[in-house]
Structures are given as structure tokens and as C-alpha cells.
Amino acid sequence: MLKSRVKYTAASFITSAPDISKLPADSGVEVAFAGRSNAGKSSALNALTEQKLARTSKTPGRTQLINTFDVGEDLRLIDLPGYGFAKVPIEMKKKWQKSLGEYLQKRESLKGIVVLMDIRHPLKDLDMDLINWAVDSDIEVLALLTKADKLKQGKRKSEVLKVRRELKQLSDKITVHAFSSLKGIGLPELAKTLDNWYLGELTHTPPEQTSPEHSSPDQTSEQSSNA
Ligand SMILES: Nc1nc2c(ncn2[C@@H]2O[C@H](COP(=O)(O)OP(=O)(O)O)[C@@H](O)[C@H]2O)c(=O)[nH]1
Ligand SMILES: [Mg+2]
């Protein structure tokens, strides 16, 4: 089982917003998953939460809604619509690029973005636009090279190193990992990065049990194993 401080497996759907004006209140901490359509965003969200929260698809470009999920008190995961899908009409592309730009620049609660790119085709123009935008807006970036199960170990490592080297030129702070929803590759690293974004980096491991003043009646049933 995945060890994490935020309980991603308890994630629940909040709403699907057709544009950024319909998002939940801009408070707390938000982390967005972004990438080209078909990069594996929804699969990654589902792997992290161990739920079928986000709809995966063999037909790219279908999700144009911003799907929002609750992962704790004022902590949200955001599944952004994919970009770079050839069959989307140009007007829709422009509208989406404008919304994405607005979202990145105006969303106060946005702490970081997870940029998902197929390990076999990373760092396309639109990925670079997005990453540059995030760096300029002081938003943290985790780059996940998805579908890593499609490559052998050696090639997988060399691709990660190549992307790391490229992105280091934009910012020292960008983290890059190989990822596979199918095999669970990179999942602990994803959870750890998100934990740090949501809760800040801790210098010590928190105790398992919450202190007495935080206990509530509905927790008592869970304490039977507390021997
Ligand atoms: N081999 C492999 N295929 C994957 C992986 N993650 C996603 N896929 C496939 O890639 C396609 C697009 O995935 P999806 O999560 O819907 O991408 P999204 O458009 O970015 O949300 C689907 O056919 C998935 O089954 C992975 O880790 N390994
Ligand atoms: Mg999707």
C-alpha cells in the first residue's frame, strides 16, 4: 500500500467545471495534473487515488471539463483538459489556452502542477509552453514521464536523464520521474511530492494517532486495533 500523509485513496469528486469561473472557491491548496491528451493524466489520478475517479479514454480530446477532487480539508486535485489534440477546432484550442493561462496566473491556491508526458515523446512545444508558464508564475513543477512500462530499464533511465538535463535549463526546482500507472512506477515519488506541496516539508515523521483534542466521536470505531 502507498504510504502518504494526505489520504489520496479517500479522494472524492467535487465538480466538473466548464471553465475556470466555475471552479470551487480559491482557498487552500490545489495541485493540477496537466498534459497532452492521451498522456495518461486520468490513469495517473486513478492510480494515485486507487479509484476510478477520472475517466480514461482511448479517444483523446474528450475531456474538456476541469474535474476537481477533494483530498482533504481544502486540498484539491485538478484534472485539467488535455492539450494538443489535433481534432479540436482551432477556436476551442484558443479558448482553452486562454483559460489555462488564466488558471495558472490567477489561481491563488494553485501550488504546483504535475506535467505528464509520454516518455517516448516528451517536451513538445505545448509542454514547454506550460512548463515555462508555471516557472514564470512561481508554481512548482513535477514532470512525470508516463507509460514508462513501454521502455526497457536502460532506455527509461536515459530518457529521464535527458529530460532532467533539458528542464534544468529552465529551473533548478523541477523534478522529473519515470511513471507508469500500469506498473506503479513512480507512484511513491508522486505521492511524496504532492504531500510536500500540500502539507509542506516536514523535518520529522508525524505520530500515527492524532492528539486527543482532535478526536471526534466518529473516530472511536476505528480505534479497536489501537492496542
Ligand atoms: N502502457 C501504459 N498505458 C497507459 C498508461 N497510462 C495510461 N495508458 C493508456 O493511455 C491511454 C490514455 O490514458 P488516459 O489516462 O485516458 O490519458 P489522458 O487523456 O491524459 O487522461 C489509455 O488507453 C490508457 O490505457 C501506462 O502507465 N502504461
Ligand atoms: Mg483524461
Image (spheres, rainbow, N blue to C red):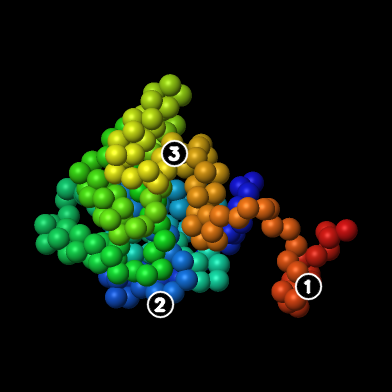
SS of the residue at dot 3? Answer: strand
Crowding around mark 3 (Cα neighbors within 10 Å: few <14, some 14 to 19, many 20+) is many
Q: Label 2 belongs to which residue?
A: 25
Cβ–Cβ under 8 Å for marks 3 and 1:
no
At 28% from the left edge and 65% from the top edge, which residue is drawn? 105
Q: Real-space Cα distance between discs 3 and 1?
A: 39 Å
Q: Label 1 belongs to which residue?
A: 212
- Left or right, residue 214 beside residue 196: right
Please tell me which of labels 2 and 3 falls first in the chain.
Answer: 2
**Residue 56 in view here:** no
SS of the residue at dot 2? Answer: loop
Please tell me which of labels 3 and 1 falls first in the chain.
Answer: 3
Q: What residue type is labelled 3?
A: His
Compared with 17, 134 (above or below) is above
Residue 155, position as x, y percentages in the image: 39, 23
Q: Real-space Cα distance between discs 2 and 3?
A: 31 Å
Q: Label 3 belongs to which residue?
A: 177
Compared with 17, 137 (above or below) is above
- Left or right, residue 80 beside residue 75: left
Residue with the most extreme top position: 154
Residue 125, position as x, y percentages in the image: 20, 44
Q: What residue type is labelled 2?
A: Ala
